[in-house]
Image (cartoon, rainbow, N blue to C red):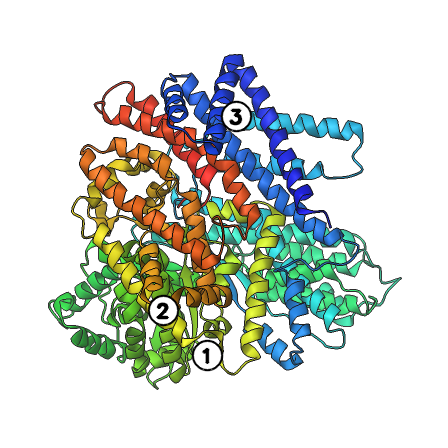
């Protein structure tokens, strides 16, 4: 295998190649003076990182602050585009490393691959039945969301993809000189296009814009990669267990919130959700049409050469008469497969348009494909599979005609208000919202046990209540038009009590989604899932669900839904509420407690992890996120949000998408097999470890809240020393930054909270207060450090927590962060709070190094460490410019003619810093 140093030298060559092209472009567009300015700043920042001294630092600041328009904007763009190029090079290098494993002559199994997971099961001598059970229970569902953290717009991402494709071709060892020159020319042109394209959106995206952006990933990568992951697992099982027949179920799915997430976004209307479902179906049908055209080319077999099944021949003859007009039939009678595919093309074309011609549901299309497959197997070698046909069959199973299940989400307060108005209109209660919880439950229980509706057909409801009612009516119609898989889950944000879920069930009943028949039989077409977000709600989660599981009416609903309950856990608000370490521990405990309680009622759970891309919102590598959960919950399946810039970093390129999903599948497969092969979950973690986390969490929570809620000046510090107010102009999402337009801390969304802290390099939500908790525990008993070191080595949850904290500290930079204190009006407040943050940073760094045994942060992952060191010197100038520009902006009147130009430049620095640091929101 190529040595690590050599492999990284290939990456450095790519970065150098792209950097040289950028330099040439700078000279062409801004003259040698622009190039020299950028180079001078670049060299100064690199030298500063190597040998810091006050004089050089001040010279650098002076050099940067002396820049004037339009040169200043070009310098900002030069550093920003450099990061886009570095990101492309690093992704290309990940693809290169994967290929190097595959090219090894002495077969080397790539770590965290599907092959490594299957090999592990082989080495552990797991019984065939145990492995098949693991496969049957395996479930990964990834939900794409439109949460506004992607600063790069679609056009930029498409250019990046083309650059990546060109870079990959340079690794071809048999490139001719002419081909290499052609690639170099193409690469130069694409980097030029990147420079000449506006990075910033000129308007906020609409919800439909966001829907189309989400569909882009299905079109470009996911539609093909998902079946390939399933095929890889099937192939590896056949390879390592050749004497067994394996059935790999559809364990890997993608869903979406885009167009269905109403929480805090008034732009998501029932009409928008309907249009989303229509666009999703349109894409699925387009992909099937393309696949069938490809299969028609391949399945040219003639009845004069092979024997075709009588069932298939009979179906073709019957369906040509029913579905095709004269001239639409395939012209060669003996090519039965092509005749069948021509019929299928016509029927796909009319899906949603004609119930007489079009398929009424995807299962009909799948039945036709199975009929072809069964026939083709009769003249196919038993040692070879019909993979192109089987891939399409798998795609139909995975995507149906709905493409991706669309989750609907809304705030519990919206449902309560609607229910209060409905109940008042029929004289059940005058003020439902003011009732104690037990009285609410009694009323809702009575309504659910009565088959009669309580909603007036022509009730004079408020606009808000009518909107809520229309959502449920739309869901009912969507099930009829697009199938029940189109919308399966209704999520209740800010769930704080059992009544929050029962209210949704009542609204579903009134729309006919939930039905109680006269004989007591219940129909229920929708999962109702709580979203537990705050620390208090996480602690109360088990009791809330237990109360529901004890109710006959809710158990009847669950029974109709296969005794399956989904529970969403919010990482963002818990972290904002109590700090990242406490939030992660409370999330872990909540899963344990709810899982154990649900087991008593024979209810199967699926935990839905509402993670963001940033570390402050539960982010990090997908496979490590999976492994950090309580092991006993993994067999129930895993559901995780994928959002913002994570979508482009993981799913823009097919090879990267494959590797990311392979790692996630491998992690869950191996962990689930380990759990299935053991009857004792307790041995996966010690009681003393949990007690340690309780102690650490308690101190960390006190430290965090003493600053965020206890310091009366903290909110002022946050709003003035970060680019929070400027973020609103970035046009990266359709959803407002604040709930209800409020200025209260509680109503500030977690995304701008994290994004702003990352921009100013303090990165506070991702690490603050963890050091106090850990250090207090280490100081308590002399053996406690050794205990934490053991936990780090043996407990995946703690290992992931500690590694994420290391990454968070490495992304933070206090020297640069100190510049932002110049933005606060009262310098005494700035110095005091920044002093607190600085002290906690050093405390956290010191204790992390003690626990890990590292000399420097992330010594155990040199590739990631090197990436940070490669980026940091080039982020610094953008931060310095951002501070200078914000100072200038905030000193001007709103109507000042300079305001627009300065705002554009601030936004360019925000976009550049986001590209440089990655996972910023």
Earlier sequence position, callout 3 versus callout 1: 3
State the CA–CA distance, disc 3 to disc 1. 56 Å
In the image, residue 386 lies at what x, y percent? Answer: 75, 62
Q: Is residue 863 left or right of residue 430?
A: right
State the CA–CA distance, disc 1 to disc 2. 16 Å
Residue 789's place in the image compared with 443, above or below, is above
In the image, residue 487 lies at what x, y percent? Answer: 43, 62
Say which residue label 1 marks: 682
Identify the secondary structure beneath mark 1: helix
Q: Residues within 10 Å of mark 1 (few under 14, many from 20)?
A: few
In the image, residue 841 lies at what x, y percent? Answer: 34, 47
State the CA–CA distance, disc 2 to disc 3. 52 Å
In the image, residue 69 lies at what x, y percent? Answer: 38, 17
Q: Is residue 824 left or right of residue 782?
A: left
Q: Residues within 10 Å of mark 2 (few under 14, many from 20)?
A: some
Task: Identify the residue shown where x is 27% and y is 54%.
Answer: 704
Say which residue label 3 marks: 195
Identify the secondary structure beneath mark 3: helix
Earlier sequence position, callout 2 versus callout 3: 3
Q: Which mark is on residue 218? A: none
Residue 498's place in the image compared with 568, above or below, is below
Q: Residue furthest right?
A: 305
Say which residue label 2 marks: 692
Task: Identify the residue shown where x is 32% and y is 63%.
Answer: 697
């Amino acid at each position: 295998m190529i040595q690590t140093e050599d492999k990284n030298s290939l990456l450095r060559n790519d970065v150098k190649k792209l950097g040289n092209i950028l330099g040439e472009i700078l000279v062409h567009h801004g003259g040698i003076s622009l190039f020299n300015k950028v180079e001078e700043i670049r060299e100064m920042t690199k030298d500063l990182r190597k040998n810091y001294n006050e004089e050089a630092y001040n010279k650098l600041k002076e050099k940067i602050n002396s820049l004037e328009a339009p040169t200043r904007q070009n310098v900002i763009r030069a550093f920003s585009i450099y990061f886009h190029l570095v990101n492309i090079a690093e992704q290309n290098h990940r693809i290169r490393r994967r290929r190097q494993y595959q090219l090894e002559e002495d077969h080397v199994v790539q770590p965290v691959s599907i092959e490594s997971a299957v090999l592990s099961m082989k080495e552990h001598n797991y019984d065939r039945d145990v492995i098949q059970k693991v496969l049957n229970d395996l479930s990964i569902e990834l939900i794409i969301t439109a949460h506004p953290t992607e600063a790069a717009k679609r056009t930029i991402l498409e250019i990046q993809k083309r650059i990546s494709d060109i870079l990959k071709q340079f690794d071809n060892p048999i490139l001719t000189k002419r081909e290499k020159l052609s690639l170099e020319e193409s690469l130069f042109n694409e980097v030029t296009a990147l420079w000449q394209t506006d990075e910033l959106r000129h308007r906020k995206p609409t919800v439909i814009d966001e829907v189309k952006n989400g569909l882009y990933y299905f079109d470009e990568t996911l539609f093909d990669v998902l079946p390939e992951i399933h095929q890889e697992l099937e192939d590896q099982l056949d390879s390592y267990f050749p004497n067994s027949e394996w059935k790999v179920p559809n364990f890997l799915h993608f869903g979406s919130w885009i167009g269905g997430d109403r929480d805090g976004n008034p732009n998501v209307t029932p009409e928008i959700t309907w249009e989303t479902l229509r666009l999703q179906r349109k894409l699925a049908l387009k992909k099937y049409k393309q696949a069938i055209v490809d299969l028609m080319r391949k399945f040219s077999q003639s009845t004069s050469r092979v024997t075709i099944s009588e069932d298939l021949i009979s179906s073709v003859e019957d369906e040509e008469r029913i579905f095709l007009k004269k001239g639409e039939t395939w012209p060669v009678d003996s090519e039965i497969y092509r005749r069948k595919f021509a019929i299928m093309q016509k029927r796909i074309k009319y899906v949603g348009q004609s119930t007489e011609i079009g398929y009424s549901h995807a299962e009909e299309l799948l039945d036709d494909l199975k009929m072809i497959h069964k026939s083709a197997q009769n003249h196919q070698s038993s040692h070879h599979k019909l993979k192109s046909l089987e891939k399409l069959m798998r795609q139909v199973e995975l995507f149906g005609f709905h493409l991706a299940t669309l989750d609907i989400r809304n705030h519990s307060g919206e449902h309560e208000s609607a229910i209060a108005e409905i109940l008042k209109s029929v004289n059940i209660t005058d003020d439902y919202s003011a009732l104690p919880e037990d009285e609410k439950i009694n009323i809702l229980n009575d309504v659910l046990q009565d088959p009669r509706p309580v909603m007036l057909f022509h009730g004079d409801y408020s606009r808000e209540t009518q909107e809520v009612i229309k959502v449920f009516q739309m869901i009912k119609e969507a099930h009829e038009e697009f199938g029940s898989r189109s919308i399966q889950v209704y999520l209740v944000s800010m769930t704080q009590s059992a009544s929050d879920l029962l209210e949704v069930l009542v609204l579903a009943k009134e729309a006919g989604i939930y039905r109680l028949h006269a004989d007591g039989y219940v129909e229920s077409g929708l999962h109702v899932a709580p979203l537990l977000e705050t620390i208090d709600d996480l602690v109360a989660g088990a009791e809330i669900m237990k109360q529901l599981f004890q109710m006959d009416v809710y158990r009847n609903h669950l029974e109709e839904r296969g005794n399956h309950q989904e529970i969403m856990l919010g990482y963002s608000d818990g972290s904002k509420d109590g700090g990242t370490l406490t939030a992660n521990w409370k999330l872990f405990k909540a899963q344990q407690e709810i899982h154990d309680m649900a087991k008593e009622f024979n209810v199967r759970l699926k935990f839905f992890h509402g993670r963001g891309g940033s570390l402050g919102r539960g982010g990090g590598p997908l496979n490590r996120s999976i492994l950090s959960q309580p092991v006993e919950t993994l067999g129930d399946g895993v559901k995780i949000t994928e959002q913002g810039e994570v979508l482009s970093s993981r799913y823009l390129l097919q090879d990267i998408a494959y590797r990311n999903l392979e790692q996630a599948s491998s992690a869950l497969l191996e962990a689930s097999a380990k759990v299935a092969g053991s009857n004792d979950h307790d041995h996966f973690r010690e009681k003393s470890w949990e007690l340690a986390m309780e102690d650490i969490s308690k101190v960390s929570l006190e430290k965090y809240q003493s600053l965020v809620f206890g310091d009366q000046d903290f909110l002022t510090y946050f709003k003035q020393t970060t680019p929070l107010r400027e973020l609103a102009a970035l046009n990266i999402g359709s959803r407002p930054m604040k709930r209800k337009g409020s200025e209260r801390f509680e109503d500030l969304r977690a995304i701008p909270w994290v994004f702003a802290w990352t921009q100013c390099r303090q990165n506070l939500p991702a690490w603050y207060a963890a050091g106090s908790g850990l250090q207090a525990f280490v100081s308590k008993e002399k053996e406690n450090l050794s205990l934490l070191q053991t936990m780090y080595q043996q407990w995946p949850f703690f290992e992931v927590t500690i590694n994420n904290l290391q990454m968070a500290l490495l992304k933070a930079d206090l020297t640069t962060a100190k510049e932002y204190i110049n933005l606060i009006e009262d310098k005494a407040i700035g110095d005091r709070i920044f002093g607190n943050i600085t002290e906690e940073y050093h405390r956290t760094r010191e204790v992390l190094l003690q626990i890990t045994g590292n000399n420097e942060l992330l010594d155990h992952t040199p590739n990631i460490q090197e990436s940070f060191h490669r980026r940091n010197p080039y982020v610094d100038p953008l931060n310095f410019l951002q501070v200078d520009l914000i100072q200038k902006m905030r000193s001007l009147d709103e109507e000042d003619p300079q305001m627009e130009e300065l705002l554009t430049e601030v936004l360019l620095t925000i976009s550049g810093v986001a590209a440089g640091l990655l996972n910023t929101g």
